[in-house]
Amino acid sequence: MAANAAPVIAIDGPSASGKGAVAQKVARRLHFHYLDSGSLYRLVGLAARHAQVSVTDERRVTGLAAALDVRFVDDDIYLDRQLVTDAIRSEEAGAAASEVAMLPGVRQALLERQRAFRAAPGLVADGRDMGSVVFPDAVVKIYLTADAEERAARRYKQLIRKGMDASMAALLQDIQARDNRDSKRAIAPLKKCSDAIFLDTTNLSIDDAVEQVVARYAAATQAP
Ligand code: C5P
């Protein structure tokens, strides 16, 4: 890590593993900035749909990713000045995100945008390649996961709470398809880095996971 670079806590893992909730809570506890890198891929997927561009058209989707007009305001996200906070959370947006995320041009276009979130006093970043590609010098790297069935159940509750339609069987199928695509893709696949700490939240509450991450950070930054 460059001497003056703000510390980063990288939290990677599959979809619906709880990493977003854990990362946000850790950021709040430490008064750090927060990057939800998945939202950027979701925004690119949505931008492609708005522009009626196929998610497999690498040249045009990369152009959209590079020019993404996005604003994060408190807990809201605006794309081209349109409020898209809920729109990017749909299963359809998640599937489109994992399609555009396979395109090397898109990943390259989003790299600097993600690194720009790094600022004092520190950053908590969640995604798939935070520890491996975007912030390889992160002071703490966590690989957060849970059983696919448990993740589908969590997603189900989340969607129902928001008044959205959901089916457990379809969600499980979608999660498994996304895991498969994310871990098998050629570029920046989802995988646990050798220096990441494995945290299984199948039987662990979000708050317990937060405690563990904060403790790891304290241990990693404590003066000898
Ligand atoms: O984390 P979330 O489910 O919002 O991410 C949506 C999709 O974006 C993932 O399925 C993955 O394909 C992609 N993604 C990625 N790299 C990241 C974050 C998300 O490829 N750092």
Image (cartoon, rainbow, N blue to C red):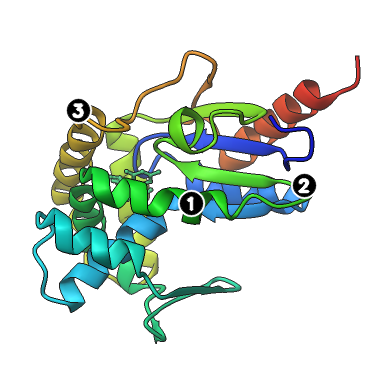
Which residue position holds label 3? Answer: 184
What's the amino acid at mark 2? Leu
Q: Position of residue 39 (x, y in %)?
A: 40, 59
**Residue identified by numbered label 2:** 30
- Disc 3 element: helix
Q: Nearer the viewer, residue 107 or 149?
A: 107
Furthest toward the bottom, the residue is 81
Q: Is residue 173 left or right of residue 205?
A: left
- Residue 213 in view: yes
Identified by mark 3, the residue type is: Lys
Q: Position of residue 69 (x, y in %)?
A: 40, 75
- Looking at the image, residue 221 sits to the left or right of residue 181; the answer is right
**Secondary structure of the residue carrying numbered label 2:** helix
Tag 3 and tag 2, C-beta contact below 8 Å: no
* Number of the front mark, 1 or 3: 1
Q: CA distance from mark 1 to mark 2?
A: 24 Å
Q: Earlier in the sequence, mark 3 or mark 2?
A: 2
- Answer few, some or many: residues within 10 Å of disc 2's Cα (few below 14, many 20 plus, some between 14 and 19): some
Q: CA distance from mark 3 to mark 2?
A: 34 Å
* Number of dots carrying numbers: 3
Return the x and y of residue 145 as percentages of the image width and height: 42, 30
Q: Which residue is mark 1?
A: 112
> Residue, x 31% and y 60% (percent of image)?
42
Q: Nearer the viewer, mark 3 or mark 2?
A: 3
- Vertical arrangement, residue 211 with respect to residue 66, above or below: above
**Mark 1 residue crowding within 10 angstroms, few (<14) / some (14–19) / many (20+):** few
Under mark 1, the amino acid is Glu
